[in-house]
Image (cartoon, rainbow, N blue to C red):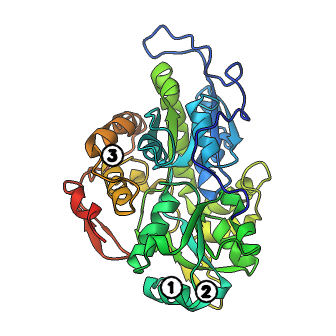
Amino acid sequence: MAVAGTGIGLGLTTGCGTSDDAGTAATTGSGNGSSSNRKVKLGFIALTDCASIVMAKELGYFDERDLDVTVEKQASWPATRDNLLTDQIDGGHGLFTLPLSVATSIGGDGRRDIFVAMMLNNNGQAITLANSLSDAGYGDPEQAAAAIEAAGGANLAMTFPGGTHDLWLRYWLLAAGIPLDSVGIEAVPPPQMVQNMTVGNVQGYCVGEPWGAVAVKQDIGFTHLATQDLWLHHPEKALLVTRKFKEERPEVVKDCMAAILKASQWLDDFDNRDEAAEVISAEQYVNAPAAEIAGRLNGVYELGSDLGDKEFEGSQMTFHRDGLVNLPRKSHYIWTLAQYQRFGYLAEAPPYQELADELILSDLYAEVAEAEGIDIPDDDMQPFEIALDGVTFDPADPDEEAGRP
């Protein structure tokens, strides 16, 4: 069993404050969405892709909009979920699928009380394998399957049931022809992945950076696949908000979104990335060496296990891409629900469009983007291709994808 693995049951995590000081208890608006309460608590996990929220704080972009924002490190994705559901935090950096996982009872209790306000980043995750599986090489699922079979199997880790890392890991396993029940798969908090591989609890994991790079630097594992080679410009983290925050203080939500959009643009000026790596490396944020963050943030991946370097110019982690990143797309939620069925999480077709319409605040994002002069993509609900196995997904026909082996 992995060290500090995480369950999926709802626990009332209270480590991030109480309703008396959470900045959400005393709303002074008159019911029309206005509020003089400008205090906001945003959570984040120690991952490189928390950068737009952290930099919005550090660069003073929240202050520019008269927001009193605190950013608070969360212990795990279940802790983030619990703190959102109990209004201990107002919103924050989260797996874009977390609200859907909770709503379908895969990673929660079925509530529909967490919402996607905007996307924070694309790309930048990785499947890391232990050096004992080095015959897998880079990017070939069938070669990885042979290495795992030769080793007599493997225990693998992701970060949250139904979360993005769970999706990428299981999708890769099926592309490799590896039955999902033939390997161990468990949830481990992102910062604890390296420890679990070091002591041999897991032989592979899927997680966000810098924990893939750290495994390489410590010479315990290698990068078998960067997720941008699985699905180019895939959705990853989102700004999640609570029902209370979006309903009682919508103008404050929009101001937070605008500040984060400004930080997203700053981050996609690549001249700023070394500075960003230095800032988020601090103990109160990611707590990892800046150099190990900066390499992959800039698109240069040292793969480990004598595989050399791989450059992802233009396809590394991105935060804005002229607005292409930040629109939350309903088609991506429909794809996720189809995967939940493929993986055996759901026994039958869920209400695809209903869940996408309810949990994704695309109209709110469009309002903020328009006010900030940011173009709004028009590609939602259009077919798209997953590069790893060359499959085109049509959101108008999710049942076809759900029924694939």
Residue 327 rendering spot, x and y as whole percentages:
38, 47
Q: Residue at x 44, y 38 (%)?
A: 110
Say which label, 1 or 2, has the lower sequence index. 2
Q: Secondary structure at mark 3?
A: loop
Residue 364 x %, y %: 38, 33
Please indicate whether residue 369 sits to the left or right of residue 77 in the image: left
Task: Tell me if residue 269 comes above or below residue 57 in the rendering.
Answer: below
Identify the residue position indicated by label 3 in the image: 376
Q: Are marks 1 and 2 in contact (CB under 8 Å)?
A: yes
- The residue under label 1 is 144
211 sits left or right of 336 in the view:
right
CA distance for labels 1 and 3: 39 Å
The secondary element bearing badge 2 is classed as helix
Q: Sequence order check: which comes first, mark 2 or mark 3?
A: 2
User: Quick one: which residue is furthest to the top in this view?
Assistant: 30
SS under mark 1: helix
Toward which corner of the image does residue 65 lie, by quadrant?
top right
In which quadrant will I find the N terminus?
A: bottom right
The residue carrying mark 2 is 133
| Amino acid tagged 1 | Ala
The structure residue drawn at horizontal position 19% and vertical position 57%, both measured from the top left corner, is: 397
Q: Position of residue 148 (x, y in %)?
A: 55, 85
| Residue 228 visible in the picture | no
Q: Taking 194 as reference, is 364 above or below it?
A: above
Q: CA distance from mark 2 to mark 3?
A: 43 Å
